[in-house]
C-alpha cells in the first residue's frame, strides 16, 4: 500500500501516453474546442460516478480554505487544455507533446522552490536532462 503511488503513476503514464495520438486523429475532423468539451464531459461523468460509488460529495469542500487553490487550478487547467488541444490540432505530436511535457520539469522546480522539497543531485540532473530532451525533440 505504501508504494501504491508508483503503480498509479505507471497507470497514469500508460493511459496518458495514448491521449495525444488519439486526439490528433480525432481532431482531423473535430475542432479542438469541441474535443476539449467532449473529452472532459466524459471525464466528469466518470469521476462523478466514481465519487458516487465512493460516497464522496464535493459539497463539504465548497467552503474549504483550500478551495481557491482548486478554483485556480481549474482555470489554469482549462487554459492549458485548450492550448494543448489546439497545438495538437495544428502541429505534430512529436513536437507538441515534448514541449507540453516541460510541465514535469517546471512543476518539479516549483515543488523544490515553493514547497521546500529536497533537491538532490539526481533530481537536478533529471530536470536538466528533461529540458535538454525537449529541446532536442522539438527542433
Image (spheres, grey):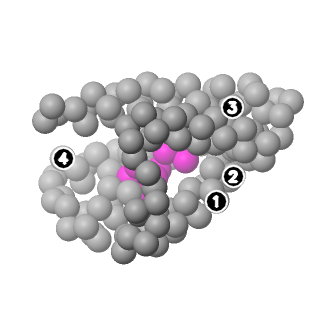
Q: Which residue is mark 3?
A: 23
Left or right: where 32 falls relative to 53: right
Q: Secondary structure at mark 4?
A: helix
Could you tell me how far apart the alpha carbons at marks 3 and 1 are, in whole angstroms?
A: 17 Å
Q: Which residue is mark 1?
A: 79
Question: Which residue is pictured at 36% across the width and 74% down the height?
Answer: 65
* Sequence-earlier tag: 3 or 1: 3
Could you tell me how far apart the alpha carbons at marks 3 and 4 are, in whole angstroms?
A: 34 Å
Left or right: where 126 falls relative to 25: left
Question: Which residue is pictured at 24% across the width and 54% down the height?
Answer: 124
Labels 2 and 4 touching (C-beta < 8 A): no
Q: Which residue is mark 2?
A: 82
Labels 2 and 1 touching (C-beta < 8 A): yes
* Figure quadrant of residue 21: top right
Q: Quadrant of the C terminus?
A: top right
Q: Is residue 69 visible?
A: no
Q: What x and y, as percent, mark residue 75?
A: 59, 64
Q: Which residue is mark 4?
A: 122
Q: Is residue 64 visible?
A: yes
What span is in magenta? 97-106
Amino acid at each position: 500500500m505504501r508504494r501504491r503511488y508508483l503503480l498509479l503513476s505507471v497507470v497514469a503514464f500508460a493511459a496518458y501516453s495514448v491521449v495525444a495520438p488519439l486526439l490528433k486523429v480525432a481532431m482531423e475532423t473535430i475542432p479542438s474546442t469541441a474535443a476539449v468539451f467532449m473529452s472532459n464531459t466524459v471525464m466528469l461523468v466518470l469521476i462523478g460516478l466514481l465519487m458516487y460509488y465512493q460516497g464522496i460529495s464535493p459539497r463539504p469542500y465548497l467552503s474549504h480554505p483550500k478551495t481557491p487553490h482548486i478554483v485556480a487550478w481549474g482555470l489554469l487547467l482549462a487554459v492549458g487544455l485548450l492550448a494543448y488541444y489546439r497545438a495538437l490540432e495544428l502541429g505534430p505530436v512529436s513536437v507538441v507533446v515534448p514541449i507540453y511535457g516541460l510541465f514535469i520539469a517546471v512543476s518539479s522546480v516549483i515543488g523544490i522552490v515553493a514547497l521546500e522539497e529536497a533537491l538532490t543531485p539526481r533530481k537536478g540532473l533529471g530536470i536538466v536532462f528533461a529540458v535538454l530532451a525537449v529541446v532536442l525533440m522539438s527542433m
